[in-house]
Amino acid sequence: MDTLLDIRDLDVAFRTYGYRAHVLKNVSLSIPEGGRVALIGETGSGKSVTAKSILGTLPGNAHVEGGSILFEGRDVLQLAEAERDRMKGTAFSVIMQDPLSSFNPVFRIGRHLDDVMRFADMRLGERSSPAERQKRIYEVLRKVQLSDPERVFSAYPAQLSGGMRQRVLIALALLHQPKLLIADEPGTALDVTTQDEIMKLINRLVAENGLSLLMITHNLGVVRQMADDIYVMRHGEIVEHGPLRQLFTSPREAYTRELVDAIPPLYGPKVVDQPAVEGETIIALEGVSKTFSERRLIGRGSEHVAVKDVDLAIRKGEIFGLAGESGSGKTTVARMIMGLIAPSAGAITVDGATMAGTGRSDAFRHLTQIVYQNPGTSLNPKRTVGQTLSVPLTFAGLERARFDARIAELLRHVDLPAHYVSKYPHELSGGQKQRVAIARALAANPKIIVLDEPTSALDVSVQKNVIALLQRLRDELGLTYLFISHDLSLMRNFCSRIAVMLRGELVEEGEPKAVFAEPAHAYTRALIAAVPVMGDEEEQMKPSVSAEERKRFLVDAVA
Amino acid sequence: MTVPAMPQPEALSTRYMAWYRFTRNPAAVIGAVMVATVILAAIFAPLIAPYPDHVGAVVDFRNRHSAPDLAHLLGTDKVGRDILSRVVFGFRVSLLLVVGVLGVAVPVGAALGLAAGYFSGLTERIITGFTNVMLAIPPLVMALAIGNVLEPNLVNAMLAITLLWWTWHARLVYRVSKSIAAEDFIEAARLAGASHWHILTREILPNCISVISVKTTLDAAFVILFGATLSFLGLGVKPPTPDLGSMVADGRQFLPEMWWEVLAPGFAIFYATLGFNLLGDGLRDMFDVEA
């Protein structure tokens, strides 16, 4: 097999604020013709900078300090700008990662596609008529399994689902039959089931059209399905590379092993079973429903049923997992339990007290706290760690003289050094910020903590540590967790009981072991089957889903 | 060129990054220098002005309308007073107006904006509604009305400007406050039991400070300009107190022969206004905010 792309000793540095940040150090990487290569690494490891170097879209303050990028034997770094521009979209093109923000909302989908095609045609010196371009675009849309290209072509971005928009983004990359497709974390913003469909689609396109693929991701489960060769990147360096199987089964470097081990397994001997918890019921939901209604000035208002007739009992000391995709109502349930919104029907009892309305009494405040998904937005950027932690203490009625001791104790709980009290959030890493958020939740001595996808914004190795911390805190402080997530493999290992929600209804509930061994509901089966896993044995142990079932539950499934 | 290697990214403080951005922006530095000269001139006016007594009702008919020379660097006016001295003292009046107007308008506007953005519902509707009504009043008409009802002097000119100026700050802070109020950390503070007062002053306000300071700097330029307009129309400072606007008005009748009588105060207005505008733009880039 010939080499299509060959990066040799690439050195890239950024100049910011009078300093030089060396972001790529001697990066060498080669992609064979028709080969699928994955570049994996954590946040800030330089994966995206590598992709941008290939595409020639580095920001102005980046300098290529050495090395070469050979595409079919020609060094693209030496080419004139016009020539390099011509390669964009035809030699290589990129699938963008965020289907939600990559479109201009005021233009129709067709306009987005047509613009790209028209300008690429112009650069190539080809003339094309709008009608002819439209025909070509329909063809490409059909290729990405959008069965109704006419409708998609004339739709506005907001009228398409996330999965469909991701498909359009793929179509955008395929317009001019590039030789190399670069996929930068495709589908990470989407639900697992949709992501699974997108992965399958990219795989098929690559195979059918003989493309080469450079996959950039942090999700090792995805890598297994999508790549033959793997490069592991850390701090701007390639630490290890090799064929997929070798890297996953016998990694040479400690870092690679760490990455592989950090992935929670779905099936197999490595799975951890959380012991079942016997205890009194601390949270009870009986026939709880929530309807959001919207009143309009003119015409009839609309109603949206977010939660429908949910019965739930969570025992003291449990880690109760609530799984479901976006829009399934899991966050609404959590907000009702926290007393932030009132249920439209049914009763919620928390620690013996039945909740009514949205009023959060003082006693209730000590009962439940929350850790948010994104530590970047859940800490006030203008307040130090100490100031953030002192808020719940003030209002919990602690004497001011004892604040320092309590804050030091909280920091000790979450394994942060005591001098972090004076740090601002931007001085902390994502994992450290999440620890501060956990400390804030602990400050008022709550009995229940709602964990709203607390690790989905973190790197896998960091996720592992945060989960271990949460587990330790539960054992030490006797907490009860309500864990909201869509990450089923994490829930399998972390939760003592899980429930699955679909369109506002609870469709399955039980201990993880039983649920994963024999999922009763077809949706649970579809959900589990879509989880990317690390090994072939695991893949085979997943429940099977018929095409018909898939169609029933997955909005974006191929019709 | 050797560039030092980046320390840990966390090690760069926000203050360092802001300062770096500011000092790499020549326009911002020039603006800061201009503003500094205006403020220093105003503070040390009695020391700088060659004829400090010319500020008052001094008449020196022997030297009236004399062109710029060594004795009077910027010439003299129709009663023989030194224009340079009067311009330097004119900065005092302009800055007094800025401090008086913005000292009241900014806190009031910011407080109303904060409250409107944080409390939804009736509070929000009343404040934004009232702000919009006030925005619809032309400032000059308001100043004329107040000048007619009360007497036209510096205090009333300030009052007229202040009555309308807070609206811009209310609007701006409202927008920022509303978006900050939707952040997770505000809900987290509420769940932790924080009072409304705590959330408004300790959680939201610090996030608005950069926007407010940029807007206030840019506003200083407009207040100077607007104050000069009022004095030009005879609604501002009473003679013989030197004011840049009334000096332009006085000199206007002797154009084009005695050009210095208009040009000197006119250029002083231009200089102060430009300085504050450049500084404000620089601060905007430094804080990286929209205002």
Image (tube, coloured by chain):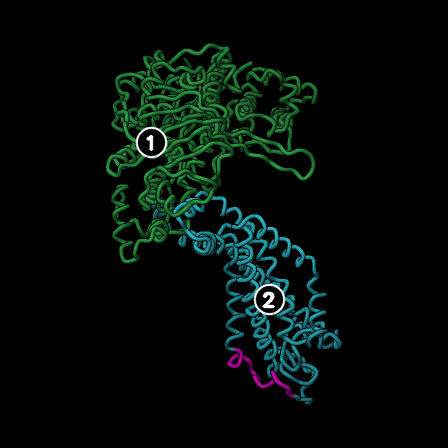
Chain colours: A green, B cyan
Residue A109 magenta = no
User: Which residue is at a point 57% across and 76% down the rendered structure image?
Assistant: B88
Q: Is residue A135 visible?
A: yes
Q: Considering depth in this image, is A423 or A1 the residue closer to the camera?
A: A423
Q: Residue at x 34, y 31 (%)?
A: A26
Kind of residue indicated by mark 1: Thr
Q: Is residue B55 magenta?
A: yes
Bin the neighbour count of mark 2 within 10 Å (Cα to Cα): few under 14, some 14-19, many 20 and up.
some
* SS at circle 2: helix
Residue A268: name its quadrant.
Answer: top left
Identify the secondary structure beneath mark 1: strand
Question: Label 2 lies in what chain?
Answer: B
Magenta residue span: B45-58
Q: Which residue is mark 1?
A: A281
Answer with left or right where residue A124 lies relative to residue A250: right
Few, some or many C-alpha atoms within 10 Å of disc 1 (few <14, some 14-19, many ≥20)?
A: some
Residue A169 placement (x, y as % from top left): 54, 25
Above or below, comparing residue A334 to residue B272 in the picture:
above
**Closer-to-camera residue (B5/A549):** A549
